[in-house]
Image (tube, grey):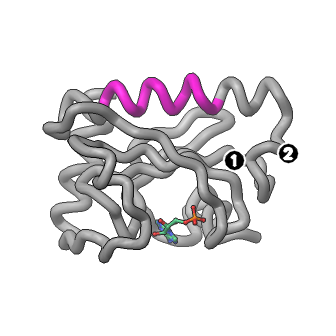
Amino acid sequence: MSIFSKIVKGEVPAHKIVEDKFFYAFLDINPVAKGHVLVVPKKEVDYIFDMDDKLLADMFVFAKKVAKAMKKVITCKKIALSVIGLEVPHAHIHLIPINDEGDLDFKAPRKPFTTQELESIAAAIADNY
Ligand code: AMP
């Protein structure tokens, strides 16, 4: 079972934002930027483009709603969307607040936030969902 499936099941802690029957959104533990969110399908599939067509389309609509909530809370120009998937073999969309294309640098040192900071960011996004 992937680490993300364990988060979905509540077996591993995460800063949850929102979930529905098919998807789960939570904060990335090593954020590229403040408010870096991951959206995952509850059904474990490694490669995003192996997902069922309808589930993939619905995941983007779910991510859109999360991104709208993020934009209300985080001061930024836009919410960017990336898919990488080289580290965790469970399909996921990265939603990242950006002001500049350089803000999407996954190789740059990640931004440290305290547990309390992550908790309050997650709660603020959830409240605006
Ligand atoms: P990638 O698979 O390359 O798209 O990267 C996986 C992302 O998942 C990275 O940005 C990690 O920081 C993030 N990540 C890994 N484990 C956890 C976890 N337990 N909770 C939250 N985010 C995680």
CA neighbours of label 1 inside 10 A, class few (<14), some (14 to 19), many (20+) = many
The C terminus lies in which quarter of the figure?
Answer: top left
| Local SS, label 2 | helix
Q: Is residue 105 left or right of residue 112?
A: right
Instruction: Please provide the residue range marked out in magenta.
Output: 59-69
Q: Which residue is identified by label 2?
A: 50
Judge by depth and name the residue closer to the eye, 2 or 12.
2
CA neighbours of label 2 inside 10 A, class few (<14), some (14 to 19), many (20+) = few
Residue type, mark 1 in image: Lys
Q: Which residue is identified by label 1?
A: 42
| Local SS, label 1 | loop
**65 magenta-colored:** yes
Vertical order, 48 against 2 (above or below): above
Q: Residue at x 41, y 32 (%)?
A: 66
Q: Disc 1 or 2, which lies upstream in sequence?
A: 1
Q: Is mark 1 within 8 Å of ligand 1?
A: no
Vertical order, 68 against 70 (above or below): above
Tell how many labels: 2
